[in-house]
Amino acid sequence: MFSKIKNVIVFDTETVGIRDKQLLEIAAASLSITRNGFVEQQEKKRFESIIKGNNNISKSLLDFQSFVSNEPRLFIAHNICFDIAVLKNNGFTGYLEEDIHLCSLKVIRQMNDEIFPYPYLMDKTSKGKLSKNLSSVYAGLFGNRFTNAHTALADVNALCKIVLHPSFSQTINKIYPHAFDR
């Protein structure tokens, strides 16, 4: 599945506006991929869009495009459909046909209870189920919450730590057998 992938980009967007989803900031980290899963991040960046006009948004999208390169990529975000829609709504056109989008939320939903050693730290939803929001998942895996949640860079740092957790790659292999074959 990931055999043609050269770059793994973990990213997050923060927005303002309910309908427009105007881009406020993007943060991204670059990871390596091996036969055993993902490897420590190589580089991390934050791209800020000050919402005063399209020039700032265009500049941050161009900077983001430059960061993610033009080789086949695996994009990972916690709710990737939302983040991809935000990028598209704000004019990002740099997708390649070979790109793969992986929603960490989908992977996390497949993780079983034994992977979360601290389920009591996770928030309960109104229906009594464990919440799978980024802060709750982080607390479930690492025993504490991360600071500055809902800022793009803090969310990317937390998501990278989750993605680098061995159980994340193991779960991907359960969902997509041979995903890491090279």
Image (spheres, helix red, strand yellow):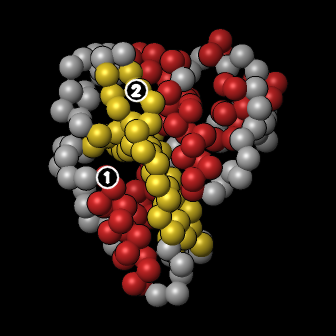
Residue 131 visible to the viewer: no
Q: Secondary structure at mark 1?
A: helix
Q: Looking at numbered disc 2 in the image, what kind of residue is underneath it?
A: Phe
Q: Position of residue 34 (x, y in %)?
A: 31, 22
Q: Position of residue 144 (x, y in %)?
A: 77, 32
Q: Position of residue 104 (x, y in %)?
A: 49, 36
Q: Is residue 141 left or right of residue 95?
A: right
**As shown in the figure, which amino acid type bears the numbered disc 1?**
Val
- The image's mark for residue 68 is 1
Callout 2: few (<14), some (14-19), or many (20+) C-alpha neighbours within 10 Å? Answer: some
Residue 64 vertical position relative to residue 117 in the rendered view, above or below: below
Front one among 61 and 116: 61
Mark 2 element type:
strand
The residue drawn where x is 72% and y is 41% is 146
**Residues under labels 2 and 1: Cα distance?**
17 Å
- Towards the viewer: 83 or 181: 181
List the residue tagged with mark 2. Answer: 38
Sequence-earlier tag: 2 or 1? 2
Q: Can you give x and y, in whole percent of width and height, for residue 23 in the image?
A: 50, 70
Q: Which residue is located at x 26 percent, y 29 percent?
A: 2
Residue name at image x 65 percent, y 55 percent: 150
Q: Is residue 114 visible?
A: yes
Label 1, residues with CA under 10 Å away: few <14, some 14-19, many ≥20: many
Residue furthest to the bottom: 53
The quadrant of the picture occupied by the C terminus is top left
Image vertical order of residue 1 relative to residue 99, above or below? above
Residue in the picture at 18% in, 33% down = 4
